[in-house]
């Protein structure tokens, strides 16, 4: 009761704490922050210099005294202290601490396959960063809510959230996850595939940012009208050590990413095999919904549809599905269905 009273004055926050990007949803205001999950710190003093887009611009370009860190890997925290600083920075940007304004309640999205230790790390980071109340929600459930799937109905809905570090596949019904699979393959892995391909085929060393730009520009999951697209790939020649440029086609980029995309498709098929037949019938009617940045890879919906023999739809604004889902849950915490969608609390900490 007291927490609900405080909630009238604080700005409840939903966070999609992603490997590649962090999105922040504030109750009543919508998504107010969408920034890369990168923090630049001074190595000598450990002081945070930049967070988000400005820090990402420094990746691969910093002197020895500055380090640009991605504190999340494969959807989970790899550097607790830096993650805490990043969350604290985002809270400060959206939550005005004036007078007696209480600290915010916070809901964070996490991959479905994480351990209890990893869950505790995310919650502790939020509480240490200034949240008075922190709960977790599995990303595929948040994505399903953000994509307006009928999660409260006794029908099966399938969501595939292809993020930066993980791909989450889940079948939801009656406010809960019936079947879920999580594989630590996402946009980052596709970038690494491109780096390895350019090294193997062209003896060319390219950076992560260059690989990401190529993936966004002409990456695809199947043959299509985009196959005649070509871009210039720039890097360092491994034989001479000098700069060199080569032209790369959409077909070559697809060949580079084929292994990872194939594993994502197999994970979806494995999830369908585990799904009860009644729910499979519902999915055939409604189709599979794609969310996350990976849903924007050209032709990935067609590739999954051909592999599963089911209709596949890309959610509206797939990049923000998880963040919008956390926001909807924060606005309807009194709804038993929304409460059931949250990860059960295994311990208590913070004001309730």
Image (spheres, grey):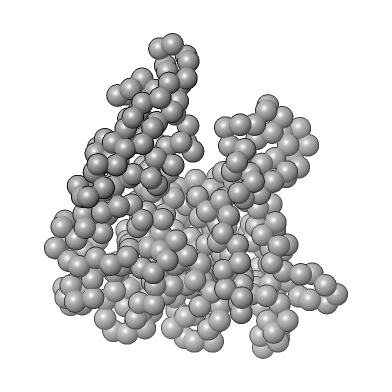
Residue 87 location in percent, x, y?
65, 57
At 24% from the left edge and 65% from the top edge, which residue is drawn?
312
Above or below 236: residue 15: below
Give the residue at the far right of this rendering. Answer: 99
What is the tally of numbered marks visible in this picture?
Answer: 0
Which quadrant of the structure image shows residue 39? top right
Give the residue at the far top of this rendering. Answer: 240
Q: Is residue 276 visible?
A: no
Above or below 21: residue 176: below
Which quadrant of the structure image shows residue 130? bottom right
At 66% from the left edge and 78% from the top edge, which residue is drawn?
352
Whether residue 10 sits left or right of residue 15 in the image: it is right
Residue 41 location in percent, x, y?
70, 40
Q: Is residue 183 visible?
A: yes
At 64% from the left edge and 61% from the top edge, which residue is drawn?
126
Which quadrant of the structure image shows residue 258? top left
Whether residue 109 sits left or right of residue 47 in the image: it is left
Residue 70 location in percent, x, y?
56, 43
At 55% from the left edge and 81% from the top edge, which residue is drawn?
331
Which is more toward the observer, 231 or 319? 231
Q: Quadrant of the N terminus?
A: bottom right
């Amino acid at each position: 009761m007291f927490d609900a009273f405080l909630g009238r004055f604080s700005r409840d926050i939903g966070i999609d704490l992603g490997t590649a990007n962090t999105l922040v949803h504030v109750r009543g205001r919508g998504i107010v922050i969408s920034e890369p999950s990168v923090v630049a710190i001074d190595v000598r003093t450990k002081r945070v210099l930049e967070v988000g887009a400005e820090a990402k611009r420094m990746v691969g370009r910093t002197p020895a005294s500055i380090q640009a860190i991605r504190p999340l890997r494969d959807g989970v925290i790899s550097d607790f202290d830096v993650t805490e600083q990043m969350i604290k920075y985002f809270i400060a940007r959206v939550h005005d601490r004036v007078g007696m304004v209480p600290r915010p309640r916070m809901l964070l999205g996490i991959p479905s396959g994480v351990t209890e230790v990893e869950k505790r790390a995310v919650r502790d980071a939020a509480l240490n960063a200034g949240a008075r109340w922190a709960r977790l929600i599995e990303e595929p459930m948040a994505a399903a809510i953000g994509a307006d799937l009928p999660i409260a109905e006794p029908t099966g809905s399938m969501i595939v959230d292809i993020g930066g570090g993980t791909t989450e596949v889940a079948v939801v019904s009656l406010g809960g996850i019936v079947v879920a699979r999580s594989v630590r393959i996402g946009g980052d892995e596709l970038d690494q595939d491109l780096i390895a391909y350019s090294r193997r085929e062209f003896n060319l060393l390219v950076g992560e940012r260059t690989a990401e730009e190529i993936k966004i520009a002409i990456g695809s999951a199947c043959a299509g009208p985009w196959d005649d697209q070509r871009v210039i790939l720039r890097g360092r020649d491994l034989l001479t050590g000098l700069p060199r440029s080569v032209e790369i086609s959409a077909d070559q980029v697809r060949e580079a990413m084929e292994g990872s995309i194939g594993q994502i498709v197999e994970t979806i098929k494995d999830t369908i095999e585990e799904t009860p037949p009644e729910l499979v019938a519902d999915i055939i009617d409604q189709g599979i919904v794609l969310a996350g940045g990976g849903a924007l890879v050209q032709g990935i919906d067609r590739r999954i549809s051909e592999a599963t023999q089911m209709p596949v739809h890309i959610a509206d604004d797939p990049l923000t599905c998880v963040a919008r889902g956390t926001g909807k849950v924060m606005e309807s915490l009194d709804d038993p269905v929304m409460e059931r969608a949250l990860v059960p609390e295994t311990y208590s900490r913070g004001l309730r």
